[in-house]
Image (cartoon, coloured by chain):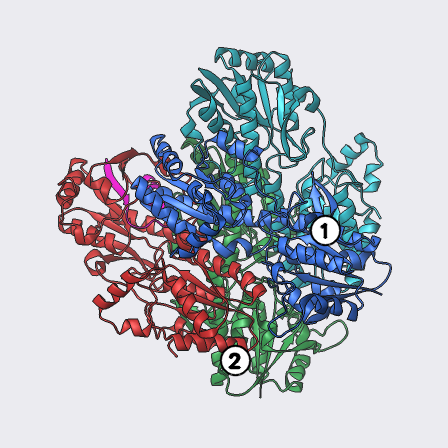
Chain colours: A green, B cyan, C blue, D red
Amino acid sequence: MLRVGLLTSGGDCQALNATMRGIVKTLTNCSPKPVEFYGFEDGYQGLIYSRFRVMTSADFSGILTRGGTILGTSRTPFKQLDTPEADGVEKVPAMVHTYHKLKLDCLFMLGGNGSTKTANRLRQEGLNVIALPKTIDNDTWGTDMTFGFTSAVEVATKCIDDIHTTASSHGRVFVIEIMGHKVGWIPLYAGVAGGADIILIPEIPYDLKAVERSIEQRIENGGRFAIVVVAEGAISKEDAALSKKEYKKKLAARTSPSIAYDLAADIERVTGRETRVAIPGHTQRGGEPDAQDRVFATQCGVEAARGCLEGEFGFMVAQRNGKMCRTPLEEVAGKLKCVNPSSDLVREAKMLGIGFGDE
Amino acid sequence: MLRVGLLTSGGDCQALNATMRGIVKTLTNCSPKPVEFYGFEDGYQGLIYSRFRVMTSADFSGILTRGGTILGTSRTPFKQLDTPEADGVEKVPAMVHTYHKLKLDCLFMLGGNGSTKTANRLRQEGLNVIALPKTIDNDTWGTDMTFGFTSAVEVATKCIDDIHTTASSHGRVFVIEIMGHKVGWIPLYAGVAGGADIILIPEIPYDLKAVERSIEQRIENGGRFAIVVVAEGAISKEDAALSKKEYKKKLAARTSPSIAYDLAADIERVTGRETRVAIPGHTQRGGEPDAQDRVFATQCGVEAARGCLEGEFGFMVAQRNGKMCRTPLEEVAGKLKCVNPSSDLVREAKMLGIGFGDE
Amino acid sequence: MLRVGLLTSGGDCQALNATMRGIVKTLTNCSPKPVEFYGFEDGYQGLIYSRFRVMTSADFSGILTRGGTILGTSRTPFKQLDTPEADGVEKVPAMVHTYHKLKLDCLFMLGGNGSTKTANRLRQEGLNVIALPKTIDNDTWGTDMTFGFTSAVEVATKCIDDIHTTASSHGRVFVIEIMGHKVGWIPLYAGVAGGADIILIPEIPYDLKAVERSIEQRIENGGRFAIVVVAEGAISKEDAALSKKEYKKKLAARTSPSIAYDLAADIERVTGRETRVAIPGHTQRGGEPDAQDRVFATQCGVEAARGCLEGEFGFMVAQRNGKMCRTPLEEVAGKLKCVNPSSDLVREAKMLGIGFGDE
Amino acid sequence: MLRVGLLTSGGDCQALNATMRGIVKTLTNCSPKPVEFYGFEDGYQGLIYSRFRVMTSADFSGILTRGGTILGTSRTPFKQLDTPEADGVEKVPAMVHTYHKLKLDCLFMLGGNGSTKTANRLRQEGLNVIALPKTIDNDTWGTDMTFGFTSAVEVATKCIDDIHTTASSHGRVFVIEIMGHKVGWIPLYAGVAGGADIILIPEIPYDLKAVERSIEQRIENGGRFAIVVVAEGAISKEDAALSKKEYKKKLAARTSPSIAYDLAADIERVTGRETRVAIPGHTQRGGEPDAQDRVFATQCGVEAARGCLEGEFGFMVAQRNGKMCRTPLEEVAGKLKCVNPSSDLVREAKMLGIGFGDE
């Protein structure tokens, strides 16, 4: 008997279920031994509190297209990993205990950066862990691609498309806030795909004057409207010059719920043009995975299952140069994959005439 | 020679172009005389300032599926109709002048409530005006349906769908703000279509306690999450009891950009549950018209053209009990079609278990 | 205890699950007595062979957006209702037996024309039956609307949209076959919504010469391509003049799988223009219900449940002039609601310049 | 003055306009000299007959999302390149003449395999040609990706999704024919993304017995239905053993319009299960490009423009290992990029349990 656990951790995304289906179908199809599946509920919480469902391969059938996660998820910050739960339960020992109590041969963990750090910790505690790179943000170190990313880009792009018709009918400036607190992958891809005029991302601090110039130049060239895509975590040059502490303080003092409102007010003030806001928000992680995501998620699932069948653990499934591969967990944990401001796509976007607020 | 003008006024919506195509194709196909088309730019502004394009039927070809309006639009508040423009131009005389200067036989005006009032005024000035019921809000008096409505409902419903997967994965309450400042047609339809648990609309003032009870009851019945659909103009019973002036003052003092943020904070406070916000915003009036809208828009265009060919003017195209008909402009102007709190759909939604915050 | 059965019969469609959810949620929410649900598998087959699942309201949760039917379906031709099954089982007595054995208070039957005839037969046998008007074809007598219809129109319209880009790029004639063996509701609506140049439906026999003229006229007017929408059951004037027997014989001798191929060959022959075929086929009954369908399906479910709670049976839920109502089963059974060739929408489509092949 | 020509050749696809926009925006933005654009109509036909439009950068604005090609396209078989046109015009000299007459500095050619061969021929005649890898089929040698591919996969996958609901409701086998006459990239990706049970592609000849076994095994494992994805050019082992001539003869004798009908009849015969057909057909190359395609198309456009600005010609824009690059035209022309039957994705699909008919 092969006994495997599965859990989904952190913010949800579109292809979590597709990935689990890939793992389960491959194990069921290829394992010489019968397989028992333990689905932990609500991420690491389920592992800590031994909340799980004994599942069969049929439970993972028909979920390829379904968004979200049938197991539920939760955020368990790595920083508090050694802080006991409110009820006194010690997290790491509790997780190790659950793993051993169920005599698991392997734990599949679908999660992003923070969750992978926790997975690495469990590896250090001697558990057989295989991580799968889940996040719409595409910011996981050690892989070119994460599942969730292309679907999120599709949703964000559709939002930019829909705003185009109303922006052009009214001749307005629109500020569209796209997910990305620390990295700008979704805003960059969706901005290019959606035909944005300006894209502001955390990796390239912007100058409001440059944004103004880009808008005015577009109007001069005959444009009736302008589309500004801004990452949640975009930052002005001015703010980027602050100390981390000062910036946090400034953010905390902000009365508007997010950057788009402030930036729109700034743009309206400096350009005198009617400026509106659109925030697709959590829809970017909702709904069905697109076809690319489903293929990639399936490949991740197969590769993870292969590792388990071969008795190799302690890695994260990855894709590099179009090939599936395995990256050791200790190499991944704690690192962030950012947009390189001098990367090809940024350079190409600039040649196209897209402003990044840094000119 | 038949000389007709077209303009699109007020907030844009999805089937404006489809409607104009319907008018133009029908006139081109059925008029015994050749037809000349004058497309006024940016709504009534184009009529006031004589900004127009001489257009052919080919210019209206291939636009059936295109959102927005190829003519541009603007808002010209009826209240300021007799206030001169900033540059001293008298609006009404200027519009009458343009009409006569171009020797128009008819002006087709695609617009909502305010715009129809202005159209009625032009009728009183002796112009041959035919109005077409444009608005996503479906609040136009004298017609069961407006074009833009079903498309907006589709977009709003898709947003609720997408939020469902993330809400259920995380076990959260989500407040989704749907368009409707004065009326709740879109939130009502999208709320029912999207499987909302609670729907709050301007026509039914809500009690926060009742909202709380609905959420708790859902959780008790085994739900892991709750979806609250709130119209932009939803109002609490408490606020509904204020004088109009006091309420406006209260609104003006609000620091958050819209009701969803405040309601979410309220819900989080009274229920103790993690509550998030989603605001599809202007995407609700963007993108392509759905099939229903295109059929209806086309029917509106044909009916308007028929009126013109028959020499009947001064009406708004309407649909009542599934039949196209004509409603005199003077009957329409200045009235609002609201959701009746005791109407069938509200009653049915309540039987289904949807809360309206009034229980 | 209230004991109710549910079954879905005939060709599947998009809002079957949404409708059952409406019934179940309303009964659960409004019934003074606890409710037990019996879901019969694969339509009337489940009732005949007593194949059913005892279900709870939770089983009908989360299915609002899901296409198809969670109960499965099958076709049980009314004509063979009194012919025993292959294994000798007498259908009608078997169904009556199952109903009584389970002590059902009511049977909800979601089905189209044939299935409603069977439901009427069960009513005559003394069962409490409530029918709900399921069919993408919208051909059910006694109701203005059926669930499945607007969703099918959306799919068919999307197909016409997608073909437009390729047709225009290559300057081709495209024949798009849309579902409708006996009636032309979907081709008519999708044809108008999709901007078809020609629409051929069973109710209006066509003349190939007239089709040719329409195409040539469109090319003369500057069109580079033409879109011909043809119902599965469209018929030429020539064939319409045949006796039913002769026509059946002719159809049986046809070597191509469907009318689109033959019509395309005819058009290519008479016009000399490159002509291609597109057949969206079963996708028209697949995928998610659109928002309109979900609202209507939900209303049907509530109305059916209301009937049951009020102790009224033997009717089909219907909508007339925008109001939900109940039509006696004996009035519905065996009748077909066809497109009236002189109805408003056909007349409007003709004013727009759409050809129906009858000019 | 920089004078550039553009043409789109061969079967249309989704991101042709997006690619041209990328070329034009980059040249406009980055060229030190003013640029004049010559858009040739209907592919190489426009170059042969000097049919073109003088265009400005504004003509390429707002087309990012539009499917098809604003220039029109046609197929000009490479094999007949030296056969004069019906009117006696010599193709190659005519194209060279047009190029020189307009004093072009560069010709951008968006096309697939055959069109690239012609482009290479023009290069040999001394013209400055830059090719861009257009095709939904992804079969262009020298690049990992072609524009059109991911969008076509999305459409094909959506079709498989929609068929799933109806297949499962009725418990049927469905044969879905996906584009790919010579290569199986779209069926392979869409099959994996859509959760197909069996995928048959030209590169892996199938055995009907193996297909039957896969279906029966799925039913045994509890499946109610089966989805068979078949490429247009899929071939049985038996037929693959024929000489090319014999096979062509056999194909010519086929009475059904395409392989899906024959395969469905075969499957119904050997399994005794109700089997239906779905053919998304030309919709796979229609409609809007997806976000991935728009990004890639834009990158292709920028890279092509860069080549022109740097004075480098005679290459095809390509992507290898995620990097944009340039492949000499003589290396590309006349080669086909096929699915390797032992490639990763095929192997992964088999581990997942997908049958390819070769077991």
Q: Which residue is mark 1?
A: C329
Q: In the image, is residue B291 above or below residue A69?
A: above
Crowding at label 2, few (<14), some or many (≥20) Cα neighbours within 10 Å?
A: many
Q: Amino acid at mark 1?
A: Leu
Q: Is residue D14 visible?
A: no
Q: Position of residue D131 (x, y in %)?
A: 26, 51
Residue B146, by quadrant, is top right
- State the extent of the magenta-drawn residues as a range: D1-30
**Where does label 2 land, which residue?**
A27
Query: Residue at left 51%, top 50%?
Result: C179
User: For the residue marked with disc 2, what is the amino acid?
Assistant: Leu
- Whole-Å distance between the Cαs marked 1 and 2? 52 Å
Q: Quadrant of residue C343?
A: top right
The image quadrant where one finds the N terminus of chain D is top left
- Lateral position of residue D65 relative to residue B323, left or right: left
Question: To which chain does the residue with label 1 belong?
Answer: C
> Can you see residue D129?
yes
Query: Chain for mark 2?
Result: A
